[in-house]
Image (cartoon, helix red, strand yellow):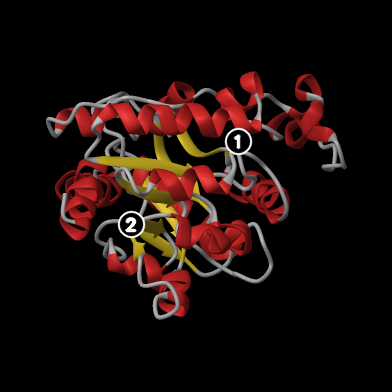
Amino acid sequence: MWHWFTDPLLDLGHSVEHFDHFETNARYGFDACGEKFLQRLRSGGYDVVLYQTPGQDQMPRAAIREGSRHTVLVAWNSDDDWQWEHTIRMAPLFTFMVTTYAEVYLSNRDSYPNLLVSQWGCYDRLAKFASPKDHAFTFVGRLYGTRVRDCKTLSQKAGLKVFGAGSRLLKLGIPEFPGSSRIPWLSGRPLAFEQVHDVWNRSFISFTPMEASVPSMSLQLKGRAFEMGLSGTLMLTNSNPALEEYYTPYKEYVPFHDLNDCAEKARYYLAHDNERQRIANAYHDRTSSEHLWQHRFQKLFRQIGV
């Protein structure tokens, strides 16, 4: 998130400073992290502070509460599909709290009037729309849960090529097992931010699963739906009404209903590149005009009045 919360804000003409609460807590301790955080706020003269809410507290909550007295303090929740029960208890500490889950917002806005809803955006520095495409059909990311089964099926039926943590297990035909992620030489190493974008930039079609990581939510909006929007790839993703608020199906992306449908559509668009390019171009244009991180921050700052 460092990239997303730096360059787009600089592009908008803002000055940006960072306070790493993870590193500060690890280096100096829990209480000292809160003290250093407050020292920065008291002396900084900041218009707004964006605070990434992790699944585990990094400083005393009293420090966050005190910090909101010195500036507009905005919590940005990253994973409310599985950590909302933790972050909901922190909402009163902040001036505002942002969730990217519309259902979380709709269910809780009356109880927490400082709750806002936003969405992931596209970081435009690493996209290379005109990059030659030498990967046909790909998935890049961490393999877990049903992704292992789905990627194996699509590899067999449509030639899906998989990159990232867990990908080597799939290639070797070894089932995922507890602790496999702690053996990266066997399971496959996670890719750096730049490497992920390189795969998207080079892919004709990108498999984009939207299944949530917890059973209580069947589908969600993954950040990758926006992140790869300028790459020139075609997004092939689960049929999901929530995504239709941002992109138009069959005009800016292609939905699928099950794995057989996904494989069939991957094969079709690989064989009809003019149609694939038309959709990928429209995906690029919609992302560029509406879904950059710059757009997210402009809207957020209007909402909170800064």
- Mark with earlier residue (1, 2): 1
Rendered-image quadrant of the N terminus: top left
Q: What amino acid type is highlighted by mark number 2?
A: Tyr
- Residue 253 — which label? 2
In the image, residue 300 above or below residue 45: below
Q: Nearer the viewer, residue 135 or 232?
A: 232
Left-right relation of 37 to 147: left
Q: Specify whether residue 291 is in view.
A: no
Distance Cα–Cα, label 1 vs label 2: 20 Å
Q: Specify whether residue 207 is in view.
A: yes
Question: Where is residue 31, by image quadrant?
Answer: top right
- Residue 237 — which label? none
In the image, residue 254 above or below residue 240: above
Image x and y of residue 290, in percent:
18, 52
* Residue drawn at x 42%, y 49% as measured from the top left: 76
Q: Secondary structure at mark 2?
A: loop
Image x and y of residue 188, in percent:
71, 26
Q: Nearer the viewer, residue 228 or 302?
A: 302
- Total number of numbered discs in the rendering: 2
Q: Secondary structure at mark 1?
A: strand
Left-right relation of 169 to 196: right
For label 1, the residue is 162
Q: Nearer the viewer, residue 35 or 89?
A: 35
Image x and y of residue 201, in percent:
36, 30
In the image, residue 241 above or below residue 52: below
* Residue drawn at x 46%, y 73% as measured from the top left: 103
Q: What amino acid type is highlighted by mark number 1?
A: Val
* Residue drawn at x 75%, y 23% as measured from the top left: 184
Question: Where is residue 71, by image quadrant?
Answer: top left
